[in-house]
Image: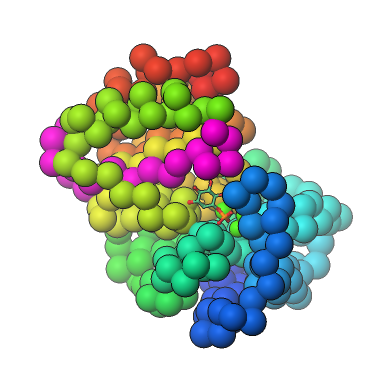
Amino acid sequence: MHAMLNIAIRAARNAGKVVTQAYAQLDKVETTTKGANDYVTNVDKAAEKSIIDTIHNAFPDHSIIAEESGLNQGKDDEYQWVVDPLDGTTNFIKGIPHFSISIALRIRGKTEHAVVYDPLRNELFAASRGKGAQLNGYRLRVSKAKDLDGTIIGTGFPFKRKHYMESYLAMFGSIFAECGDVRRAGSAALDLAYVAAGRLDGFFELNLKPWDIAAGELIAREAGAIVTDFSGNTEYYQSGNIVCANPKVLKAMLANIRPHLNDALKS
Ligand code: IPD
Ligand code: CA
Ligand code: CA
Ligand code: CA
């Protein structure tokens, strides 16, 4: 295994310990509000610090962009780590046992290594570009569904940006009418990893941040998924509007999304 993926895994496992220990004593967790329906805890920050320390111990010059502390510019900015120390903070705060740690390494703008770790289930999803995706060492493959019929589609609701609600609900309604059922589990990184594992047949969400998707999208692609924005192009990393599924399910999802795009959602 590549040395840099190894460091990502070590960082994720260390942060996993921080998060699971705190989860066992949830009444001690301190929560503050960043914006409407948008929370951060002392645990997000402690996990992030532990990840940054692990990466910088191994690669002192690499840049790191992390949700809670922003950009740590290193001397060598061709190497950029993209870190979400706790994806699913709302689940964590409410005691819902579904959240993850997401770490990706982008080299000259291309994601090369990725880890999404679910510390409660000890499920570690990992991928390196061109080398496939694994869950705890076992090779992953996306679902074989040929259309939306009977599929389980993951999504996230635009709870921070309710002005997208109308377009979103129209897309949702159109997909829901054709698929088997929908899940809103609360961790975008795990949603993408679950598409890689074939547990979800597809996933879509709007306005995500780079740290929500950087690792999960490589893992999904290495398992055979196609990832696009809402117009079927490749701007999802910039816009945060993302659709992910095997090629046939993706086509069916886009057909249900396209009629409901407003200008803000075209990329
Ligand atoms: C959130 C989760 C959630 C998604 C939100 C994200 P956070 O990340 O990924 O599933 O719907 O848009 O912000 O804030 O818990 O790291
Ligand atoms: Ca957050
Ligand atoms: Ca997140
Ligand atoms: Ca987070």
Quadrant of the rendered image containing residue 93: bottom right
Q: Nearer the viewer, residue 4 or 16?
A: 16
Number of disc labels: 0
**222 relative to 215 in the view: left or right:** left
Identify the residue shown where x is 26% and y is 55%. Answer: 199
Identify the residue shown where x is 74% and y is 48%. Answer: 78
Q: Position of residue 104 (x, y in %)?
A: 58, 56
Identify the residue shown where x is 47% and y is 72%. Answer: 95
**According to the image, what is the colour scheme of the structure?**
rainbow
Residue 263 visible in the snapshot: yes
Residue 79 visible in the snapshot: no
Q: Nearer the viewer, residue 78 or 68?
A: 68
**128 relative to 225 in the view: left or right:** right
Q: Position of residue 131 (x, y in %)?
A: 41, 55
Quadrant of the rendered image containing residue 135: bottom left
Q: Nearer the viewer, residue 4 or 72?
A: 72
Q: Position of residue 46 (x, y in %)?
A: 70, 74
Identify the residue shown where x is 40% and y is 38%. Answer: 204
What secondary structure prevails in the magenta region? Answer: loop
User: Vertical placement of 85 versus 262: above or below?
Assistant: below
Quadrant of the rendered image containing residue 83: bottom right
Residue 157 in magenta stretch: yes
Residues shaded magenta: 141-162
**138 relative to 238 in the view: left or right:** left
Q: Position of residue 231 (x, y in %)?
A: 44, 21
Residue 98 in magenta stretch: no
